[in-house]
Amino acid sequence: MYQFHRAFFAFMRFLVRFWFALTGRYSCPKYTPRSKTSLILTNHNTNWDFFYFGAPFRGHMYFVASEHIFRLGFVSRLIRFLADPIARKKGASSQETIDEIKRRLAKGQNVCMMAEGNRSFTGETGFISPATARLAKECGAGLITFKIHGGYFVNPRWSKETRKGKVWGELSGQYTAEELSAMTDDEVEALIERDLFVDAFADQREKQYTYKAKAPAETLETALFACPDCRAFASLRSRGDRLRCLSCGSEHVLNRKGFFERPDGQAPAFETILEWSEWQKAHLKSHVQKMKDTQDPSPVRTDDGAKLYRIHPLEGKVLTAEGTVKLFTDRLEVGGGEAPQGKPVSELQKDLLTIELSSMKSMAVILVNTILFTAGDEYYELRLPPRASALQYLIAYYDLKGKEYKR
């Protein structure tokens, strides 16, 4: 199948290059790998990054993809047949993924991996695991580092709307296996972090590109969950180009260049989503610590209309609980609440499922508001309602577990 995959990749690359040339929406010079076989590491900001990374590359590559795309029935089978991506199980151990990457590289096949493992909510390149540097050193292949600029503004992770605007690619570096073996793990890690770092707002302050959208702030409350004016949590609501706090009434406007303004002309609390996000992360950490110190019995976050699935290797995805989700300082609860007005209460809503925080080993957010986590030997998917902030649950989880959230 390898030859078929190469042919399909070449065909798609031709179409994508033609589309980019026709529309002018993406620019990046073509490049030829220095090494016969390479591990390609990239940053990650859009749903179409594999087109941006694949178009300028002279050769074939396999992609590492989130495990959830392998649970889509016929679509998943088609993706496997055409491209055979490597599955990455988020919110769980990555050892199987690493082993498969090494196996394919050993066979002389290039592999491309988004090093962050997740799209950025803030426009800044996120945490890259030290295991990535070890993989680059141990795999015996060359290393290519490549990054995309402008992608965050064209396809923000928190938004359902795609914007029209400039995106461009940059080949950061190429390193042979011999060059990597002469470096320490820390040196390779620093090299990868340096090569893949992008601050979308620093780029935008310099370029001042316009990104057009009908409702540029819509669903921004999935990424920004705390009001900087009254410090309330879960009180922000978006509509059109505005983000308004239901608690204090303050408003911010997100303009076409991606920066905040006030509708009354006063200075915004923060100029960028990144600055706002850094503040709310510290604010939430302080709030969680206070709740722990005072043994506050109230939930850190709660949302109605959630669904919890248990993911089994053979049975697939099984609905386990639904209704209200509550994250406390010592546990996660799902169900046990009332159904929406006029709708019957299901057995799953009547029953309360409790998962102790001490049993939870890891957590990740996929898409916008879906959480994957492991608890004991079980693997779960928690789907939140459309405007809920999965990011707040994730950051609070890190704070409650005494870990640092680095994304």
Image (spheres, helix red, strand yellow):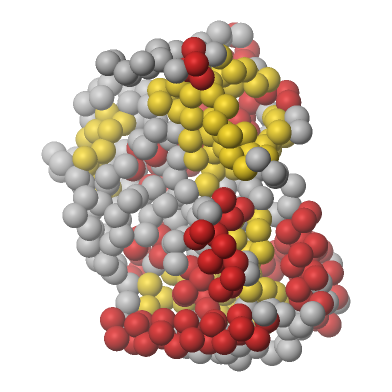
Q: Is residue 120 above or below residue 359?
A: below
Location of the N terminus (image quadrant): bottom right
Q: Position of residue 212 (x, y in %)?
A: 22, 62
Number of marks in picture = 0
Which is nearer the eye, 65 or 330? Answer: 65
Which is nearer the eye, 340 or 92? Answer: 340
Q: Is residue 360 left or right of residue 296?
A: right
Which is nearer the eye, 28 or 366? Answer: 366
User: Which residue lies at the image location 81% right of the left edge and 77% below the top edge?
Assistant: 106
Q: Is residue 81 above or below residue 362?
A: below
User: Which residue lies at the image location 74% right of the left edge and 67% below the top edge?
Assistant: 101
Q: Position of residue 8 (x, y in %)?
A: 54, 82
Residue 359 seen in this snapshot? yes
Which is nearer the eye, 286 or 42? Answer: 42
User: Which residue lies at the image location 45% right of the left edge and 28% below the top edge?
Assistant: 306
Q: Quadrant of residue 247?
A: top left
User: Which residue lies at the image location 59% right of the left edge and 18% below the top edge?
Assistant: 353
Q: Position of residue 203 (x, y in %)?
A: 40, 66
Q: Is residue 71 left or right of residue 339?
A: right
Q: Position of residue 237 (x, y in %)?
A: 28, 33
Residue 188 seen in this snapshot? no
Q: Is residue 260 above or below residue 4?
A: above
Q: Quadrant of residue 303?
A: top left
